[in-house]
Image (tube, rainbow, N blue to C red):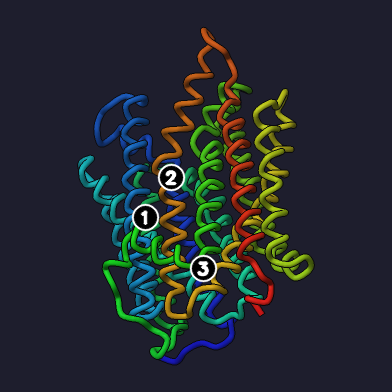
Amino acid sequence: MPVARKPESILLFVAFIVFIDMMGIGLILPVMPALIEGITGTTIDRAAEIGGWLLFAYAMMQFLFAPVIGGLSDRFGRRPVLLVTLFLLGLDYAIMAWAPTLIWLFIGRIVSGIMGASWAAANSCVADVTSPAERGKYFGILGGAGAMGFVLGPGIGGVLGEYGERLPFIAASILALLGTGVGIVILQETLPKQKRRPFSIARANPMGSILQMSRTPLVLGFLSTIFVLQLAAQAQIAIWAYWLIERFDWSILKIGLSVALFGILLALVQGILTGPLIKKIGEWRAGQFGLLFGIPAYLIFAFAPNDWFVFLGIIVGAASGFAFPAMQQMMSSRISEDAQGELQGSIASTISLTSIIGPVMMTGVFGAYADKDGFYFPGAPFILGAALMVVSILIYAVTTRRYYSAADTA
């Protein structure tokens, strides 16, 4: 299989894979409560607890297998890994559409977490075919594609769910399998054989992968920044709907529209504006610029007196999307070409780790301060989020001051 040389020749389909991956996740979100209730015959509160464990299983598998998927793509190439994981993801959604018992639903989410770790291989494609100075732009485009998939998924899943709670799973399965067929025809390999490296199980695990990356101090610093940044983001991810209902008595439709607005703005920031911003002010300044917007966004949420401030916080918070692709660009330029998959796997594992511990932490804080019999302040998780953003900015500042040099990316 020939190796693609121009980023435009592979970017569209790789972005499509990321879009399908995130859209598939979004498609099934609206119907999971009904599906769990239908399978178990339990009440909604118990279904919510089961749903939490399903999310835990998914995040844990992503944490464990992202370095494996990244390492396999460094060994065998991006194309086979992306196509195989997308195909198996399609079969997995079919299993969940059929699942007669709760154990099958857990098996489905476990497999989804493993196959969803293909994010590492997708981002590695960008590193393969772009210069270090261009990578932030294309990483941003992939992030924008994922954001748009996550925006459209819940809306489409909600519509399909009106005709049956299993129908969105069938739609996600068909979408993934069709994407595999298209990929077989048009996706070219991006990693030449001479740039591949042997697969090592010692390096293809979360800690081994991160330890390997820690040999480059700038990468270790940015992985730490990303960890704290994503932990702060759990303030939104974990308690958003509960907070809006408790604080402003929002409807499900209004909550969904707020998520859609954030996704659209994030897609705009990462998919369209990141590249020009990096070109104009440089990669490290773009990263700093994005991180700084997180603090006011969380404080706006925490003290929002009415609905309009919620939307203001969403607009301000979307600008923080500049930070992640800028850091990806700087990290990928310090890592050898045969370890780009390993790097992206380390990033994915770092993010997945926050998805394991963050929801428990943030929902715990919310529960403690949403009790009207005590000190009532349901926005408390956002204060914690703002504090974590301060920490992430400090780590970023120390890392760039000590280890960053623009000459390294030339």
Q: Quadrant of the N terminus?
A: bottom left
Q: Is residue 410 visible?
A: yes
The mark found on residue 16 in the picture is 3
Mark 1 or mark 2, earlier in chain: 1
- The residue pinned by badge 2 equals 355
Mark 1 and mark 2 in contact? Answer it, CB < 8 Å.
Answer: yes
Which secondary structure lies at badge 2?
helix
Mark 3 closeness class: few <14, some 14–19, many ≥20 residues within 10 Å: some
Where is residue 185? Give x, y as percent: 42, 83
Q: Is residue 40 left or right of residue 131?
A: left
Image x and y of residue 57, in percent: 31, 46
Q: Which residue is mark 1?
A: 62
Q: Amino acid at mark 2?
A: Ser
Percent position of residue 61, x then y: 32, 53
Is tag 3's residue or tag 1's residue first in the polypeptide sequence? 3
Q: Amino acid at mark 1?
A: Gln
Give the structural element (helix, strand or loop) at label 1: helix
Q: Residues within 10 Å of mark 1 (few under 14, many from 20)?
A: many
Spatial CA span between label 3 and label 2: 24 Å
Inter-mark Cα distance, 1 to 2: 10 Å
